[in-house]
Amino acid sequence: MLKIVDHALVQENLTKIRDKNIDRVHFRSGIIEIGRLFAYEFTNTLDKKSVSVQTPLGIAEGIKIKDMENIVVVSVLRAAIPLVEGISKVFKDAEYGVIGAWRSEEPPFKAKMEYIKLPDLENKIVIVADPMLATGGTMNSILDEIKRRDNPKRLVVFNIISAEPGIEKIFENHPEVEIYTCSVDEKLNKEGYIIPGLGDVGDICFGRPCL
């Protein structure tokens, strides 16, 4: 399932962070806000049950959202840090995991994973947060690793921007996955970056690493 989140506030924040002249502080804050709004959007898909509550003057009917405590959010370091910060403002009872993953600079952009810390994922709703879904190689490897360890109840990907090749790769290998994104962009350049995209999210958020 592919869900393009077209809420006006999401799209306004996307427009702001696409601007090449945006400063680091406002870029990060825009991503945080998108993460928060994504989480609100996703909450509408969770099961609900009817409950009664005693008010000061009587009984009122309401709802309780199921599975709010059955969520695991996986941050793909380092670019997903602000996205997860926004998600955590809604899913306060969630568990969190991290995966240090990146891709090689040359085609076929093979994924590398050297740090993995995940809680129990069995029968959990697992949300993998990574701002960009470009070739799909890294995300595909992450989903492989998650499914190798446990059997999640739902497997969800939050991306700010996705590209068709990445979407196709994920659905080819993991057809049950739910992808939430703000935009599906036109193409990839020869370096594997999404066009028009955002650029290198990690570098814009935190600075270019000194190797």
Image: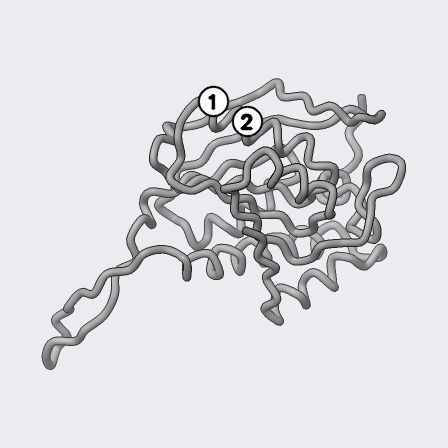
Count up the numbered dots.
2
Give the alpha-carbon distance from disc 1 to disc 2, as whole Å.
6 Å
Residue 72: name its quadrant.
top left
Question: Residue 61: x percent and y percent?
Answer: 18, 73
**Tag 1–tag 2 contact (CB < 8 Å):** yes
Q: Nearer the viewer, residue 36 or 65?
A: 65
Residue type, label 1: Arg
Q: Nearer the viewer, residue 197 or 25?
A: 197
Q: How is the image coloured?
A: one colour
User: What residue does disc 2 label?
Assistant: 144
Q: Residues within 10 Å of mark 1 (few under 14, many from 20)?
A: few
Q: Secondary structure at mark 1?
A: helix
Q: Residues within 10 Å of mark 2 (few under 14, many from 20)?
A: few
Residue 208 is left or right of residue 46, and the answer is right
Residue found 63% across the figure and 21% down from its top: 113
Residue that extends furthest to the bottom in the rendered view of this protein:
57
Residue that extends furthest to the right in the rendered view of this protein:
190
Residue type, label 2: Asp
Residue 148 has which mark? 1
Up the image or down, 113 lies above or below 207; here it is above
